[in-house]
Amino acid sequence: MSASRNTRRIVAAVAASVALVGAAALPAVADGHHRDGNSRRSSIVIGKVQYDSPGRDDRSNRSLNAEWVEVKNTGRKAVNLRGFTLTDKQGNRYRFEGLRLDGRSSVKVHTGKGRDSSHDVYQDRRNYVWDSRDTATLRSDRGHVIDTRSWGKRGR
């Protein structure tokens, strides 16, 4: 019986070792890239940013709409963005309402006024949002950070 008991101890020790090695080998979640607390990377990311409207900053609707943040779906499946939010460092917030973003597609979130479509949505603001040194943060409908993107120099 002692051989059987020793065999069980060895098998238990090996199983425990395998579990520890497996847990250590799990991929780390990249900062700012997670989906609702899961360890999987989200297919929804912040793409390009046009933070400084080209031309004169005259606060015209045309100038405001030349400022935008792109939200991309890098996956193959469509994702419903209802309730997702896009914010800047100052706390300005845009909330997505009923937009289904197809796989491998993107939508630009413009600052000014306009008619929402599957490729362009509008915050309906009268002032610029994205400063030359800023951070865009995309959160899920549950408030979890999905992605962040910063630009400009810090500390100035």
Image (cartoon, helix red, strand yellow):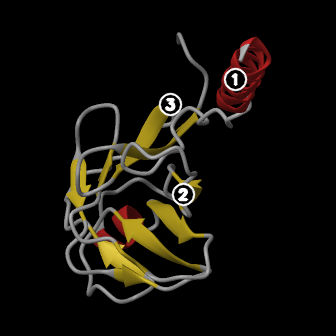
Q: Quadrant of residue 47?
A: bottom right
Q: Please tell me whether mark 3 or mark 1 is closer to you in this view.
A: 1
Where residue 145 is drawn, which disc sits there? none
Q: Relative to residue 66, is residue 43 drawn left or right?
A: right
Q: Secondary structure at mark 2?
A: strand
Residue 98 position (above or below residue 123)? below
Q: Residue at x 30, y 80 (%)?
A: 99
The residue where tag 2 is placed is 45
Q: Residues within 10 Å of mark 1 (few under 14, many from 20)?
A: few
Q: Position of residue 143 (x, y in %)?
A: 25, 45
Residue 28 position (above or below residue 111)? above
Q: Residue at x 55, y 71 (%)?
A: 73
**What amino acid is labelled 2 in the image?**
Val
The residue where tag 1 is placed is 8
Q: Please tell me whether mark 2 or mark 3 is closer to you in this view.
A: 2
The residue where tag 3 is placed is 133
Residue 36 position (above or below residue 83)? above
